[in-house]
Amino acid sequence: SEELQVQDILKMMDQLPELQRTIFNMYEVEGYNHEEIAEMLNIPEGTSRTYLMRAKKKLQSLYLAHHEHSMLGR
């Protein structure tokens, strides 16, 4: 099926470095802002932003690889 399953997304998340995954979750899922994340994780706010961006890029490339793979599989 075309639809990405939750477990596919979780598998992709597992491939992120732990800190990137944590920041991605806190920002995208739990709705914290970078200031709050930085404070909670005791990291600079800029690091939070950078890691979120890296996490998104990585997930996007994993998603595209997954998508191409499923297109080829027909």
Image (tube, rainbow, N blue to C red):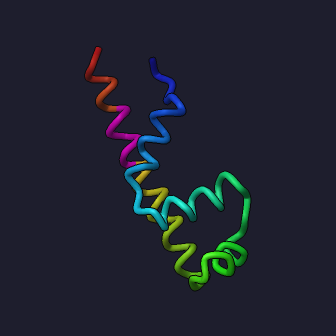
Q: Position of residue 51 (x, y in %)?
A: 49, 69
Q: Quadrant of residue 62?
A: top left
Foreground residue among 68 and 23? 23
Eyeballing the image, is 18 above or below 60? below
Q: Quadrant of residue 57?
A: bottom left
Q: Residue at x 44, y 64 (%)?
A: 54
Going by the image, does 26 lie left or right of 12?
right
Q: Residue at x 57, y 65 (%)?
A: 23
Q: Position of residue 4 (x, y in %)?
A: 49, 30
Most extreme residue toward the top, as rendered? 74
Please state, as top left, top right, bottom left or bottom right, where the N terminus lies in the image.
top left
Q: Residue at x 58, y 85 (%)?
A: 44
Q: Position of residue 36 (x, y in %)?
A: 72, 75
Q: Residue at x 48, y 67 (%)?
A: 19
Count of numbered badges drawn on the protein = 0
Eyeballing the image, is 27 above or below 46? above
Q: Of helix, strand and loop, which mostly describes the magenta segment?
A: helix
Most extreme residue toward the left, as rendered? 72
Foreground residue among 74 and 11? 11
Eyeballing the image, is 37 above or below 32? below
Please state, as top left, top right, bottom left or bottom right, where the C terminus lies in the image.
top left
Q: Position of residue 46 (x, y in %)?
A: 56, 81
Magenta residues span 61-67
Q: Is residue 36 magenta?
A: no
Q: Quadrant of residue 48?
A: bottom right
